[in-house]
Image: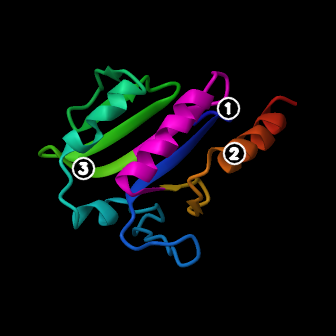
């Protein structure tokens, strides 16, 4: 991932709070977000309205429903037999991402989803808080 991008995991809010979230790490040391989706049996159609925010595109894999473009702002819905196994949301600082970010935050609030940042912390679903973090990070890579 490029320094001008930031990626979130999106998981269902299974009574997870900002204070008591403990990420599940797999044997390779990676965040195992499919555990959070495995009990939900969420069909990929749950994310169809994302197409109103970021256009749906063809993915390189049949197991990924891609909204946006792989190398910029996008949401990737990984699935097995059309049931969600993992979801990620990538923001590209080189673009005008504000509108997309606001709408994704709204979608997550409406659908009772959480954003998990690159440090595996639950992010408050508040555009201003998230955007401030982005602005700080943008200053670093623009130096």
Give the labeled residue for mark 1: 4
Tell me, yes or no, whether the highlighted magenta stretch contains residue 70.
Answer: no
Earlier residue among tags 3 and 2: 3
Earlier residue among tags 1 and 3: 1
Residues packed near mark 1 inside 10 Å, few (<14), some (14 to 19) or many (20 plus): some
In the picture as drawn, the residue positioned furthest to the left comes out as 81
In the picture as drawn, the residue positioned furthest to the bottom comes out as 20
Which stretch is magenta?
88-114
Q: What x and y, as percent, mark residue 128? A: 69, 45
Taking the spot 20% from the left edge, 32% from the top edge, the residue there is 62
Q: CA distance from mark 1 to mark 3?
A: 27 Å
Please state which of the two labelled residues, at mark 2 or mark 1, is closer to the viewer: 2
Give the labeled residue for mark 2: 128
Q: Nearer the viewer, residue 110 or 19?
A: 110
Q: Secondary structure at mark 1?
A: loop
Q: What x and y, as percent, mark residue 72? A: 53, 25
Q: Nearer the viewer, residue 107 or 57?
A: 107
Q: Secondary structure at mark 2?
A: helix
Give the labeled residue for mark 3: 84
């Amino acid at each position: 991932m490029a320094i001008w991008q930031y990626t979130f995991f999106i998981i269902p809010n299974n009574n997870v709070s900002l204070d008591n979230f403990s990420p599940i790490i797999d044997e390779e040391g990676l965040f195992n977000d499919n555990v959070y989706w495995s009990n939900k049996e969420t069909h990929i159609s749950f994310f169809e309205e994302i197409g109103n925010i970021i256009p749906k595109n063809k993915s390189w894999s049949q197991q990924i429903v891609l909204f946006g473009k792989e190398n910029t702002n996008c949401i990737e819905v990984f699935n097995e037999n059309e049931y969600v196994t993992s979801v990620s949301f990538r923001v590209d600082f080189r673009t005008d991402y504000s509108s997309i970010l606001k709408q994704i935050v709204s979608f997550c609030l409406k659908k009772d989803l959480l954003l998990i940042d690159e440090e595996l912390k639950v992010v408050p679903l508040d555009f201003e808080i998230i955007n401030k973090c982005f602005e700080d990070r943008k200053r670093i890579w623009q130096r």
